[in-house]
Image: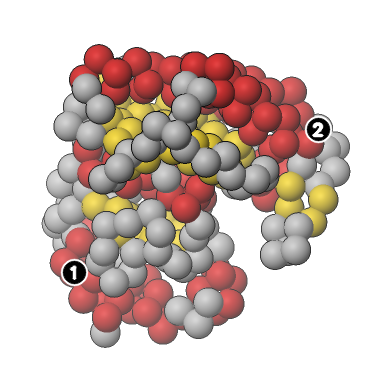
Amino acid sequence: MGDVDAQTRLEAAVEVAHAAGRITLRYFQSDVEPEWKADATPVTVADREAETEIRRRLERYFPDDGLLGEEFPEKPSRSGYRWIIDPIDGTKSFMHGVPLYGVLLALEGPDAVDLGVVHLPALAETVWARRGAGCWWNGRRAHVSAVARLEEACVCYTSSASFAAENREEEWARVRARARLVRGWGDCYGHLLVATGRAEASFDPAMSPWDCGPLLPILTEAGGTFTDWTGRATIYGPDAFSTNGALFPAILAALKG
């Protein structure tokens, strides 16, 4: 993908994420009723309307690109590129009127995820990255922190119950016990805190590709890491954690025991 095409796609992704975010705000802090999917996760009319708008715009701008989203069937790619969509990452937070939810968009090319955008509508924050072009937070360059000791780190997670549910409590306890500060600022927001230097690591013991799509390029371009719990840089792991890079070896060692 050439530089001009890459930048065009990135600018379109930011625009599309903002359009979807505006839809979510119509329903935010209202009495929106969820439906419960087969995997016991909630979905709302806001999720579906936002993803519908994302798909409509991307199909108009890039008709040959594939689409993989959380709420609707996959559209195969004819171009070799595929958009990965999560219209509301953090639906439970959204339902509770908590502003730590995001619209996630990523573009996957033949070799890697080329770009990612996370827009936090209720916080008016947007973080985006393109491979080789850096990570940006509301228009300014984003960098991870320089903290080099786990004992001085702020560590985030999404759900305390999820570690037990995924049989990962022992590994999590080893990390948690050493960290200076542990806070449940979860879903995409925790990982963005790492990318923007406000936290040092964030953990999820269960993830899907649409939860991870933009986080890999965002963390990498900010100078950090985004991997599964074995240390493999991927959006297709069953789990994920991000770090500021400096703490990656220590945290990986703690996870492995």
Three-letter amino acid code at the position of disc 2: Ser
Q: Residue at x 49, y 16 (%)?
A: 61
Q: How many marks?
A: 2
Label 1 residue SS: helix
Give the residue drawn at x 26%, y 64%. 232
The tag on residue 9 is none
Residue 73, visible in the rendered structure: yes
Which amino acid type corresponds to the residue marked 1 in the rendered image? Answer: Ala
Q: CA distance from mark 1 to mark 2?
A: 43 Å
Taking depth in this image into account, of 257 and 133 the one nearest to the observer is 133
> In the rendered image of this protein, does residue 118 appear above or below residue 91?
above
Residue indicated by mark 2 = 30
Q: Residue at x 18, y 69 (%)?
A: 250
The reply to whether residue 142 is visible in this rendering is no
Q: Where on the picture, by quarter, is residue 8?
A: top left
Across and down, in percent, residue 141 comes to 23, 25
Kindly give the residue lying farthest to the front in the view shown.
78
Q: Position of residue 69 (x, y in %)?
A: 58, 43
10 Å neighbourhood of mark 2: few (<14), some, or many (≥20)?
few
Give residue 250's mark.
1
Q: Tell me: 34 left or right of 210.
A: right
Residue 245 in picture, x, y percent from top left: 18, 53
Mark 1 or 2, nearer chain start: 2
In the picture, which quadrant includes the N terminus? top left
